[in-house]
Amino acid sequence: MSGAPPPTLYTEAGRARLPALLDGLSAQGWLLYDMGDHNPLAHRLLGLGKTTRRAFALFPARGEPRLLHHAVEASAWRDWPGQRESYRSHGELETRLPALLSGLERVAMEHSPGSAVPTVDRVPGGILELVRAAGVEVVSSGDLITAFHSLWSPEGRESHFEAARIVQATALAAFQEAARAIGHRRPMGERDLMEWIETALAQAGVTEQVACIVATGVGAADPHYDPPGRGAPLEEGCLVLLDLWGGLTGGGIPADQTWMAFLGSPEEVEPRQREVWEAVREARDGALAFLSRRAREERPVQGWEVDEEARVILRRRGLEEWFSHRLGHSIDASLHGSGPNLDHLETRDERVLLPGVGFSVEPGVYIPGEIGVRSEVNVLWTEDGPIVTTPDPQKELLFVSPR
């Protein structure tokens, strides 16, 4: 941790936020467990370097932080702000862990019942058994992770907005590149355009967590499509789904967007293609309107509620069964972050959106053998409601003529 700012949990201001959050969980402490970055959330929150042994860092709602670590790893914990004790043998660990937890009835850990939220479910089952054997109940630390790990800093926010600008500009330029290739009769497959996009992003300064999807025709009906070989050819009359993402060189908060374009004129687009696009756009905008409405009403929002709002809109259109993934994923320092997801399909994410969290809103319709359409924007949730961070969100299908 030398040379870096202290982790938030090591500061008095950071720890002052804990009691109210723990009271909301009816917990008396937050027990962070790690061994060799097996729990990357704890590793980052504690500002650790290399570790290879089990350690338990307890932040009680009231009182001084307490630590139990292996005797060989004193250096990894040199900046620890509270009491500390070490162990050598497994017998000492099994004796001293109950002592560390003495007086507590319930602690929060990186655990998700049924592994409903995999990004939070980081503590091995055997460690949970040890804690429970000490007579202590374990609840999920999901909302604590949101508050201490996934909120955007001012610097992170600035980096995200810049990445979003570059990602959008690259997407629009990519459609033009495809049209240019068709106009010049230069063969271009899906993977050729993917490679062009990744090069363009790198040249513009987006080099972290970078990748993209280019899908046309029935390939777009696979949400995580990866083209075989060079992929399907990009030709006049194609409807193209372009999903691209990445963060600035040096880190920050990445941006993630999906755009749809038709390589031809508006007169050539099929009614079914327009119908599905309009339904997806309506679901996206309906979810954003729901967020704005909740903010005006000053009512809290859980992730699953936003997903359900979009899903109802697609259900009315007879397309909900083809919406095969959650509405949105958390975005923090990781593209798929550890904060609340907008999810009432893969799980029921009941974590509350706290001001400062970011996420995607990306409804899609994927009908195998027929069509795939998605529209994705990113959102920063604030005290005043949602801020769409994607510049000029797509309102209509883009038409790019190769002629």
Image (tube, rainbow, N blue to C red):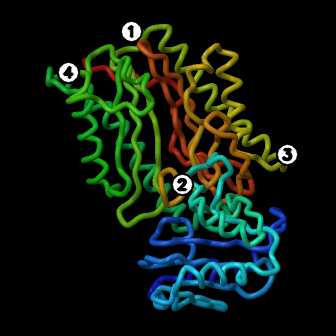
Query: Helix, strand, or loop for circle 1?
Result: helix
**Amino acid type, mark 3:** Glu
**Would you say 68 lies left or right of 198 here?**
right
Res. 146 image quadrant: bottom right
**Amino acid type, mark 4:** Gly
What is the crowding at mark 2: few (fewer than 14 residues within 10 Å), some, or many (at least 20)?
Answer: many
Between marks 2 and 1 in the image, the one whose residue lies nearer the viewer: 2
Label 2 – label 3 distance at C-alpha: 27 Å
First along the sequence among labels 2 and 4:
4
What is the crowding at mark 3: few (fewer than 14 residues within 10 Å), some, or many (at least 20)?
Answer: few
Label 2 – label 1 distance at C-alpha: 40 Å
The residue identified by callout 4 is 183
**Amino acid type, mark 1:** Glu
**Amino acid type, mark 2:** Gly
Label 1 – label 3 distance at C-alpha: 44 Å
First along the sequence among labels 2 and 3:
3
Q: In the rendered structure, are the residues bearing label 4 and label 1 in contact, judged by CB atoms less than 8 Å apart?
A: no
Between marks 1 and 3 in the image, the one whose residue lies nearer the viewer: 3
First along the sequence among labels 2 and 1:
1
Task: Give me the residue at 22% from left, 34% from top.
Answer: 192
Query: Helix, strand, or loop for circle 2?
Result: loop
Task: Give me the residue at 33% from left, 20% from top.
Answer: 263
Query: Helix, strand, or loop for circle 4?
Result: helix
| Residue 350, position as x, y percentages in the image | 73, 47
Res. 25 image quadrant: bottom right
| Residue 218, position as x, y percentages in the image | 38, 17
